Image (spheres, helix red, strand yellow):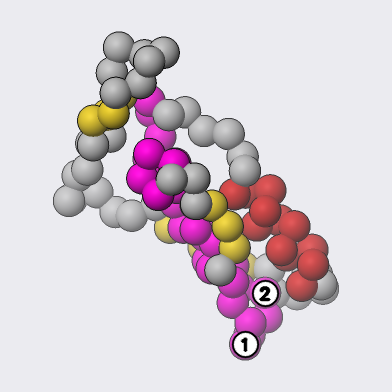
Amino acid sequence: VLCDLSWAEFCYQVVDNGKPANIEHIDLRGQDLTDEQVSQRLRHWCYAPYDLFGDSLVWFQIVRHTDSHVWLGFKSHHVVMDGAAGVV
């Protein structure tokens, strides 16, 4: 992906088919957190800064809240999905 940015000479993202996807697994079982606390944690993760020139532009987070309750977080740079970052 090559982007034309007015404030940078160029910006690109290399896609490597041999590199694993950025999927972080978090196990919160036994921490006695409310749904709101887990949601806040995912919102914080969604809006954490990252290095546009060094990091991946797409991330996933799978959060196991209880044995039967799992959250999926997805975030991407707007270059990829026009700013979509959120909790599914």
Q: Secondary structure at mark 1?
A: loop
The answer to whether any part of residue 34 appears in the image is yes
Q: Which mark is residue 68?
A: 1
Side of 37 where 67 appears, left or right: left
* Residue at x-position 35% and y-position 21%: 5
User: What is the span of residues highlighted in magenta in the rendered image?
Assistant: 53-81
Query: Can you tell which quarter of the image residue 34 is in?
Result: bottom right
Q: Quadrant of the N terminus?
A: top left
* Residue at x-position 59% and y-position 49%: 46
Q: Which mark is residue 3?
A: none
Side of 10 where 74 appears, left or right: right
The amino acid sitting under disc 1 is Ser
* Residue at x-position 44% and y-position 41%: 77
Residue 63 spot, x, y in % from top left: 59, 67
Residue 80 spot, x, y in % from top left: 36, 45
* Residue at x-position 49% and y-position 45%: 83
Residue 44 spot, x, y in % from top left: 68, 48
Q: Which mark is residue 65?
A: 2
